[in-house]
Image: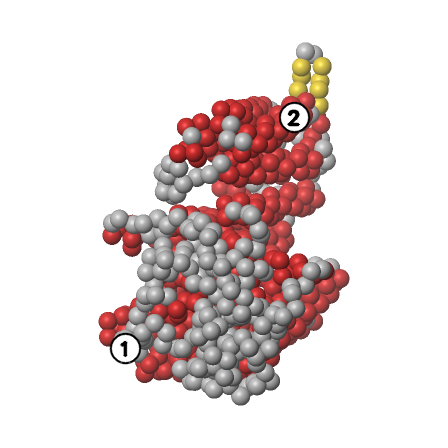
Amino acid sequence: MPDTPLIRTQDAATPTSGWHSLVSDWSSDRHAFKDVSWGKAMMWIFLLSDTFIFGCFLLSYMTVRMSTTTPWPNPSEVFALEIAGTNMPLILIAIMTFVLITSSGTMAMAVNAGYRRNRRAAALLMLVTALFGAAFVGMQAFEWSKLIHEGVRPWENPWGAAQFGSTFFMITGFHGTHVTIGVIFLLIVARKVWRGDFDSGRKGFFTSRKGRYEIVEITGLYWHFVDLVWVFIFAFFYLW
Amino acid sequence: MSEIVPGADHPIPHDHADDVELYHPHSWITKYVFSQDAKVIGIQYSLTAMAIGLVALVLSWLMRLQLGFPSTFSFIDPPSYYQFITMHGMIMVVYLLTALFLGGFGNYLIPLMVGARDMVFPYANMLSYWIYLLAVLVLVASFFAPGGPTGAGWTLYPPQAILSGTPGGQGWGIILMLVSLALFIIGFTMGGLNYVVTVLQARTRGMTLMRMPLTVWGIFTATVMALLAFPALFVGAVMMLFDRLLGTSFFMPALVEMGQQLRYGGGSPILFQHLFWFFGHPEVYIVALPAFGIVSDLISTHARRNIFGYRMMVWAIVGIGALSFIVWAHHMYVSGMHPWFGFFFATTTLIIAVPTAIKVYNWLLTLWRGDIHLTVPMLFTLAFIVTFLNGGLTGLFLGNVVVDVPLSDTMFVVAHFHMVMGVAPIMVIFGGIYHWYPKVTGRMMNDAMGKIHFWVTFLGAYLIFFPMHYLGLLGVPRRYHEIGPTSFVPDSAETLNAFISVVALVVGAAQMLFLFNLAWSLRRGREAGPNPWNATTLEWQTPQTPPGHGNWGKETPPVYRWAYAYGVPGAARDFIPQNEPPATAAGDGGSG
Ligand code: HEM
Ligand SMILES: [Cu+2]
């Protein structure tokens, strides 16, 4: 073994099929993911990590829902609104979900406009997205205050298992924080787009680096993720 | 192997891709304090980690004093003993080892070894360090808070962790601990994303993944694992904070304390154990994988041999990383889980032994007929291999349910995890510091002091932890302030305990010699030159030593081969740096 030559030229071309080609693509020169910028790669990996956070939250919710000895309040009654004399279960949540999903649509349009260097449209669409996001957070605040009025606290509630309030406030609060951060980012990036920072090469205040229109797409990735997470929260918390 | 070392004769194109926009510091403060340079951040991380590690070391002395000479030191009462244990364990695992390997070695070595100019997002990287520092300060603050630090054990199991019977449980201790952990995780994430993306997307020309030094592979995989494992701890910490501060009952069942029914009820303490160990077990490998990687490189360099089975080593690292996410409940055999789960987790645990054993064999085969230089880094490396092997073998005992149940919570467990994740990684940290110190400072560390440090630490560690296996088999429990007379522990165990404590003090003193050596060599050490170990990897080929801002000259170095071209037949020297063009390295390339 010690006498085998250690360096060989690669005479046969790189394998072209199957696992080997996958591995050699990934492990090739410089970039594992071709044409993926650093920022985008970083956002994807962050989102993967964040997925684990939300996953742990949701699994913990399911666990305490099973471990608690008192009955779980019925979500369709708890999350119902009295509108014009009729009791409508889950109406607010339906609206919130609709708003958030719509905002994903405007976000996607903003990304498109950004890449077409249509500054005005991109900035406006981001603004609209941010408004939808703010509306979502606003409705969530409304829902929180309604429940608090009815006596729901993290440690107790009038209808049953205390864990209902604990998990509700914790998980929707954590998600709402994500939305709020997203709104702030959207506003910052929209301002930069509007001002033309990415055309003029103006440097970031903190990072002293030039930005690119890609940041719109990266913000969008985050936004869609927050939206997707909501779908799971909606399904597991409100529909179960 | 032809795929590992492709195209030695392929011309490497010039670098046309856009280069990193580096932040150029203008003042002393932005250069050395709020620095965005990964090298400075790495040093900051390392020094902070060592400083807080020193606290953990002093705590271990205090614990040993108590265990060796019970009822002698009145200031070590049972509550403070628990506080010492907890802080010692948590600091060592999280704030010392994780921070030093990933934040310290990772920051310093990754950009240099893959031929990048810096981490991809230096600003976030800088924040990472400052949040880490904040986490450390919050942790230290708990020593001074009313009621002192938490004494819940480093596993922080509820419900006891937040009840009044546990030191710090109803005071500030547990709160500060949880906040500090959450901060640590946030700070780490900012750095960790940087390390991963730098490895994936910012390598220099010619640096394929399969040409990366194993050090980078180890740190990279560990970072990915940390990004996926820390979320569980984060969630656990947040929920426990709510239990403690808001009175929620995530982890708290109905409880009677001092004859009083508490307001808690319906929560699941086992849930916390799952969350904790979903983080806790990968954590073991988060400190082990960087150690594996560094050891591979040190062995290869100091034995002048190419690493045996590079490709296998990479897959073993990745495989261990993946497997370690499905073994966590082997820490919970005594929690009353279903026997089938025990069966599952015991099986997965034993399967991990396979890739791990492959690594050990490969290290040995690398050493086989190598030209072994017994330098200080090499000594520490060899010490790692035996120690890790030892800890790994006792791990096989504990991985089996029937053997674990009687041994659980005895000194046997303490001996096991100190061997495998205490002593072994610390050996690598020392070896790594002796190895890279010349690059960081331009001077060699003093060899005589290094050798004394090594022998005292190595032999001492065995004298401390080997007898603990025996104590554990006798049934001496872990986490006991004082066991007093029992029917099963003979009096001689007390003599043994006193002996262990004396050795522990001596080993601790030897670490002072190491710190002195670090400081002394900074000025008085022998000039090292750019590549004192004749190593192949890129960090030794920098235009300046210590490397300057931006690491490289006008262009990042092109890479022509893997990191282990030692003793290549026909080559002019016994090593060929990764960036040496084939034409100048005679004997290279042609030998097909
Ligand atoms: C000079 C070196 C060291 C000595 C003398 C030492 C000593 C001790 C002692 C006496 C205990 C408590 C045993 C008990 O009563 O249960 C302990 C616990 C522990 N040590 Fe160390 N230790 C050393 C280094 C380390 C290192 C490097 C690590 C890093 C992983 C570490 C991690 C831990 C952990 C995790 C615990 C368990 C804490 C708990 O039970 O909550 N120790 N150590
Ligand atoms: Cu484990």
Q: Residue at x 66, y 20 (%)?
A: A81
Q: Residue at x 67, y 14 (%)?
A: A83
Q: Nearer the viewer, residue A134 or B314?
A: B314
Q: Quick one: label 1, few (<14), some, or many (20+) residues within 10 Å? A: some
**Residue B178 drawn at (x, y percent):** 47, 50
Q: Nearer the viewer, residue B52 or B175?
A: B52
Labelled disc at residue B38 = none
Q: Nearer the viewer, residue B482 or A30?
A: A30
Q: Give the residue number, with chain letter if any, for mark 2.
A: A98
Looking at the rendered image, the quarter that the C terminus of chain A falls into is top right
Residue type pointed to by label 2:
Phe
The chain under label 1 reads B
Let me know if residue A16 appears in the view.
yes
Q: Give the residue number, with chain letter if any, for mark 1.
A: B526
Q: How many marks?
A: 2
Q: Residue furthest top?
A: A84
Residue type pointed to by label 1:
Arg
